[in-house]
Structures are given as C-alpha cells and as structure tokens.
Image (cartoon, rainbow, N blue to C red):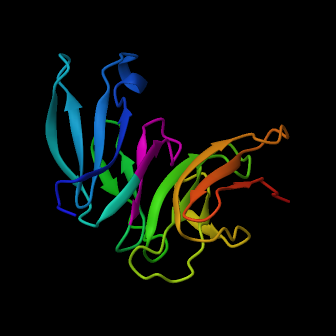
Amino acid sequence: MSNNTPIGITLFSLIIFYACLTDFDLVQGFWGPNTVWLNNGNGTFTNSGQALGTAESAGIDLGDLNGDGALDVFVTNANTSNQVWFNDGAGNFNNSGQGLGDSDYWRVALGDFDQDSDLDALVVRNGFYTYDNLYNQVWINDNQGNFTSNDQFKGYNESWGLALGDLDGDNDLDAFIANDRANKVWPNRRQ
C-alpha cells in the first residue's frame, strides 16, 4: 500500500464548539502521517501542516477525551501502539504521550462503556502484521483522557470494523464487530 492511500476519513468541526458554525474540518488517516485539513468555507480544504504521528494508521475517531470541550483524536495504528492527540481548543493537536497497546490495531469507536460520562475506546485488531491471536480491546478513560486497558473484553482478532449502540435495550453501549469469521454482537456486561 502506498503512503498516499486513504484508510479512514472522519469529518469533524473544530469551530462548532467555539462559534457554533458549521464549517467542517477534516482529519485524514493515511497509511502514514494523519493530517488535519481546515475548511476554507467554500467546499475546499487547506492542509494545516499538522501531522498526527508517523505510524501506519488504520483508523481514527474524534471526541472530547479530556473534558475540555474540544474534539480530540484517537488513532489506531497497524505497526505500533495507538495514540491520543489532544486539541488545545484552537485546532492544534498535541500528542498525549500515551502508547496504548502494541500493534495490529485496525478500527476504533468511542463511547461511554462504563457510564461515567467520558468517552472510552473500543479498538479492533486483525493480525495483519503478526498473524497472532490478538484480542480486540476496550480502553477505559479516567475522565482526563488517560486510558487503561480493560482486560475483561476478549473478542478475537481478524476484525475489520465495528459499530456501537444499545443493541439489547439495557441503556448501555454494546458492540457489533465485523470479522473475517462470523460477525459478532458483544453485549456490554459491565459489573
């Protein structure tokens, strides 16, 4: 795969929190550095010059991870650990310094799995690099944007995508995970 092949693209608005406008900016996940593109207001975008890491990124999701009201970026990487990038509120992103996991992560979805009013992360793995039996993982947020692995979730690897929602009607987030093998619904069984 070339370094110019887009893997995941997520639209978001940095200024919606500041000016209540609807100019959507863009974070583009490449099989290489992720880039932040700013909306020019006329349907075109300008590269901001920010590169969010240099890893072979496979997925991104956006949400307020540290409780400051600005959209932050959670990046999954195929060849190294996942990264969290904090938005300073002006659209500048700083690496949080967290190396979450090891490698072979594919996609991420943010949601409040433990119902403590912050965004946690579910990442799926596919063994693309190592072909090992790697488990999908839930990363629990401490309300400050610091994540720790929740070892209670043991979904198998070879996963390619995911979606979150309350699938069993019990008012918490469950996961649907698309796999090489059978797709699977994972009900949230937090204690």
Q: Residue at x 28, y 67 (%)?
A: 55
69 in magenta: yes
Q: In which quarter of the image is the C terminus?
A: bottom right
Residue 83, placed above or below residue 39: below
Residue 119 visible in image: no
The residue at 69%/73% (across/down) is 151
| Residue 42 placement, left or right of 131 | left
Decide if residue 59 is in sight here.
yes
Q: Where is residue 94 in the image (x, y as percent from the top left)?
A: 31, 54
User: Toward the viewer: 166 or 159?
Assistant: 159
From the viewer's perspective, is residue 106 above or below residue 175? below
Rendering quarter of residue 57: bottom left
Residue 165 is one of the magenta-drawn residues:
no
What stretch of residues is rendered in magenta? Answer: 60-77
Quarter of the image for residue 165 reads: top right
Q: Is residue 129 left or right of residue 137?
A: left
**Where in the figure is residue 108, as x and y percent of width and height?**
50, 54
Left or right for 91, reference 106: left
Judge from the rendering whether residue 148 lies leftward or rightward of residue 128; answer left or right. right
Residue 70, horizontal then vertical, whole percent: 43, 37
Q: Which quarter of the rendering shows the N terminus?
A: bottom left
Seen at 51% across and 48% down, the residue is 66
Residue 162: percent from left, percent from top? 56, 51
- Residue 52 vs residue 11, the one in the foreground: 11
Q: Which residue is drawn at 60% across and 73% down?
A: 135
